[in-house]
Image: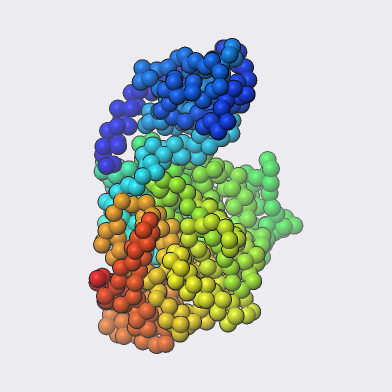
Amino acid sequence: MENKMKKCIALLCAVLLAFGTVFTPSLLAAGDISEALLEGAAASYADGYLYVGEKLTASDVAALFDGNASVSGVGRNEYAGTGAIVSVDGQTAELVVRGDLNGDGCKTASDYLLLKRAVLGLSAPEGAVGQAACVTGGSTPKPSDYLTLKKEILFPMEKQDYNGTKLAYIPLDDRPVNVDRVIYLAESGGFEVLMPDADLYSTKLDGNGTNSNGTTLGDPAALTAWLREADKECDYFVISLDQLLSGGLVGSRYLSNTDLTKEYEIIDFLVELCENNTVYVFDTVMRLASTVNYNGLQQEEYNLFRAYGAEPRATLSGSALTIENIVAGYKNGTDGSPISTSLSEEKINSYLASRERKLRLIDRLLRNGGDKLAYLFVGVDDSTPGNTIQTNEISYIRSLLGEQATLYAGTDELGMMGVARLASDLAPRQVTARTLYYGGGADKPADDFDIETLRENLEKHLGSVDVAVETTAKGDADFDILVLTRTSSAQAAVHSLVDKLQKNIDAHIPTVVIDASSGSSRVLAQKLVDEQIPLTMLLGYSSWNTVGNAIGIAVAQGVVRYDYLQFSKTVTAASDAGFIKGAAFAYLKDIAYIIEKGRYLDPWQSSAQLQAQLMSGTLGGDALLALMEGKAYICGLDEYRTGKVRSISVSNVRFPWNRTFEMTFALNPVLY
């Protein structure tokens, strides 16, 4: 499908040459013809324009009026398109078909290419054509107009076969959250994931050797070459900017070079890639400190850097909010005096140079083609509430973000968010999630690493994957999101949440659960086990790491799976297996390992020893798999259907980075 699309686009680009870069409005005087419209007519009139649907003949348009109506300027295909003139009893109006920019009365690929030129500023449609370009309303064409029209043309309301749609993915690094979870997620939505060799995007902490490029980071040059090859067989890309420019998240916190020529060349290539592809990019605001056990950094020094970064700086705004002023204020507190630290001047300078480098890279992208991206996710990495060294950086980046971009607290979930946004963009309509909070903490800081409230963070995550939000219990929604907040009444909050979850399962309401309690996770997990909740019936679940991470992981699971089940012509066994693997990974990693084992097992044990420990305990793997094996899972939504899990085997338990945080394992589900 992708290669055919590229050939079509290549041919259609030639069509653009036939259209001027400036569209001229009609010189005819318009009259108010609204009074002649028949009651209930599928048309509207405003300011000299008559707005109608596509594929209407002149006779169809004339039939909308109670009077002597005629239409002139109809194209060769006999449809009355944008720019045609409607005359009714001596009054005239120009016809507007939203999305029909070439005036043929139909919405086609030619139109969305013309609209893309308008959005990029390469043309300036005026008059009726200008109105047609504003697909979602307003007075000027916006990126959302282009994406809406493209979705409508390429993926109309009837069901599509999404299976096998290729997605090229450059991960943040080789940790399980950026690889295993993303692959399972994509598979659950019918996507085929293309990835470079792991050696090209791996990070090696101290004592773990190097990659084949001789460094401990990924290989931006090789990854760029890989993307050029992937472009030949793929139209959809999800790309980590930190990996592509810095060899991964760790590298983005460490590298401090000031000559950014190579990085800028890669950014220019990335913008070029957007011209014939749908490209989702995710980036981060550098966290307060670098990475323990990388280049000799130990915990004590990490704590000093974090404390230094957390000190308030003078906040900037308006014309004073520039990179130069931000950098100039890095070393000073709110009163302008130097911030005291026991760290050496050399180490502070290197740390601040890394921050400046990172800020200049995102600035380059946003000022030189960032608006061509299908979407940009910016995650604030490991922050803290209040004024810190990140505050001005965040304000600066936000000042440059357009409609197709979002910034919020979180990082490790962003690869999954990119996949979820693609699923939403391919879907024929926007879906709606109902958000229900339990515990009373929705409007409080999500956790100690967030910059906003829990509600704000969740709604920004949902907005970034084009999901509408319904907050009332009685409003219409496609699926529910049940959120456990920070609370002083964990037992009561958990009881209410699990009771609602069980009712939703019984009522066939698709549901996602987010454990954002930051302290009551064991209470919720234990309740799920005690009540024997069939975990396979949830569309998504997470309690992993920061609240921002948990939100993104669970939301992505729910959105991708819902869109696939609702809008795909066929639901494959491979997608079901991907869904079960993603769900099992979340329960085993988030509950059995993080909660039950306190996220600590000795990485130097054998895989068999690690597996035995992972599976044991009240909330261990065996107890959780018992709530999945033999249980039903949703495999159809248009007509509600369920499948059943026969068994799930776990093997190859390991720690890719040889540190306790990154446990992973292989999963093999067998379905009935």
Protein image colouring: rainbow
Where does residue 355 sit, x and y in percent of width and height?
A: 54, 54
Number of numbered markers? 0
Instruction: Between residue 43 and residue 454, name the one nearer to us.
Output: 43
Where does residue 221 sit, x and y in percent of width and height?
A: 33, 47
Instruction: Between residue 389 and residue 491, name the one nearer to us.
Output: 491
Where does residue 604 sit, x and y in percent of width and height?
A: 32, 81
- Relative to 120, is 247 on the left or the right? left
| In the image, residue 139 above or below residue 327 | above
| In the image, residue 81 above or below residue 473 | above
Residue found 52% across the figure and 47% down from its top: 405
Instruction: Between residue 256 and residue 407, name the one nearer to us.
Output: 407
- Relative to 598, is 49 on the left or the right? right
Q: Quadrant of residue 17?
A: top left
Residue 103 visible in the displayed image? no
Instruction: Specify the farthest residue to the bottom.
Output: 617
| In the image, residue 626 above or below residue 33 | below
Instruction: Between residue 351 and residue 310, name the one nearer to us.
Output: 310
Residue found 58% across the figure and 13% down from its top: 89
| In the image, residue 203 above or below residue 279 | below
Residue found 33% across the figure and 27% down from its top: 12
Where does residue 37 sit, x and y in percent of width and height?
A: 57, 25
Residue found 66% across the figure and 62% down from its top: 386
Q: Quadrant of residue 276?
A: top left
